[in-house]
Image (cartoon, rainbow, N blue to C red):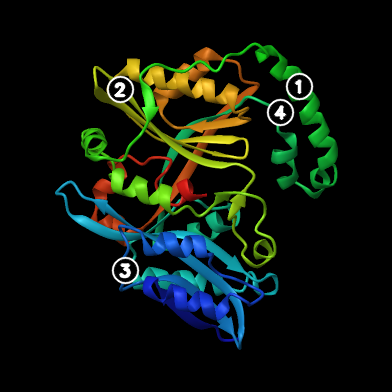
Amino acid sequence: MPMLEIRKIKCFELNAFYEEVKNNPILPISMKRILSYQNNPKRNETLPVLYLGYIGNNLVTYRSVLQDQFQTQSDEKVSCVWLSGSWTAINFRKKGYSRILLDEISKDYKGYIMNSNYGSHSFSLFSKRTDLVNYRFLEGYRFYYRFSLAEILPSKSTFFKKIRPFLKGTDQIGNLIFDSRFIFYSKKKIADIEIAKFDQELANFISNHNKNSLFKRNTEDFQWIFDFPWVIQSAKDGGFDKKYYFTTSAKRFQKKAFVLRKNNEIKGFLLYSIKNEQMNVHYIFCDSQRESADFSQFIWTIIRSEKISSLVMTDKRLIDWMQKKGGYIFSKTWNKGYFAGKELLKSFPEIQNNDIYMGDGDTIFT
């Protein structure tokens, strides 16, 4: 097997690296992600964020990582990293090159690594490693409110790819019939819910509600996430999409945050994203079941007004409300597994008991 030459790029080196490779046939990072990395409030300038593997002058594999911090029960801030983006050229797959880069990441970050957004091949790779543990699953539900066969089935087999135009037509007919039930639906505004301002008042509210959260996301993190997205709402990025193998644009991509205010006090916070026709609820903090019901009703209005095809959420109160409300075509359980470095779990065993939210890691960016 040819020897792999490894190159590592730190945050402050990303701009110069991008200028060097921007005209190459393969781009291992987008400018959107570079800006996000450089403005990450949890960044660590001393460690790499991009790992590249070359054979000769040819880039054959790369991995990017997202730097983060979690907070222990004693309020110690501990740096870690999320695996976020892996690519290997077709002719060089199943030769161990991606694993070599993962070995380097584990070594550089002393095993303080995490991962959640992975496919079946990556799951197999991680499960075989002695330095990683599949330590938990985040459980939730996926609700389907409109027909979307053309989006779901083509990824399952080449047959469905070939008949995608037929599936798209089926979706249009099905949704025309299904949506007719809501022809007189009014976009009713839910009282007391307003667009969130990432100010000190909201920061104080979130701090009082995320005490058992592992990453304790707050207004500084959320402002960064909103200001420096990895994906934007626009047409395809032209030739760039052929050079960079991860999504940078979508027909519809929105992140929105709201607060629920009563008697001039914040009683709830909600952050969700919409990508094309899918809605994900990333964070919700609220005082009581009553506020949770208000947010559930608010989400319901969005599903109808924005013609959402599928909704994913992990908060049990929201799930219970949606199940009682009905109106969906189909629903099923949804879960996301989390790997963590064995050394990380050994040093901080309380990680296994802390709350994880759907938006933790890189999911909220994609």
In the rendered view, would you say 34 is above or below 307? below
- Mark positioned earlier in the residue sequence (2 or 1): 1
Q: Disc 4 and disc 3: Cα gap in Å?
A: 46 Å
Q: Disc 4 and disc 1: Cα gap in Å?
A: 10 Å
Q: Is residue 247 visible?
A: yes
SS at badge 1: helix
Give, as a three-letter code, the residue at label 1: Leu
Residue extending farthest to the bottom is 56
Mark 2 near mark 1, Cβ–Cβ under 8 Å? no
Q: Disc 1 and disc 3: Cα gap in Å?
A: 54 Å
SS at badge 4: loop
Circle 4 is placed at which residue position? 147
Relative to 342, 239 lies left or right? right
Circle 2 is placed at which residue position? 261
Relative to 172, 38 lies left or right? left
The part of the image, by quadrant, that contains residue 147 is: top right
The part of the image, by quadrant, that contains residue 198 is: top left
Q: Is residue 217 visible?
A: no
Mark 3 near mark 2, Cβ–Cβ under 8 Å? no
- Mark positioned earlier in the residue sequence (4 or 1): 4
Circle 3 is placed at which residue position? 110
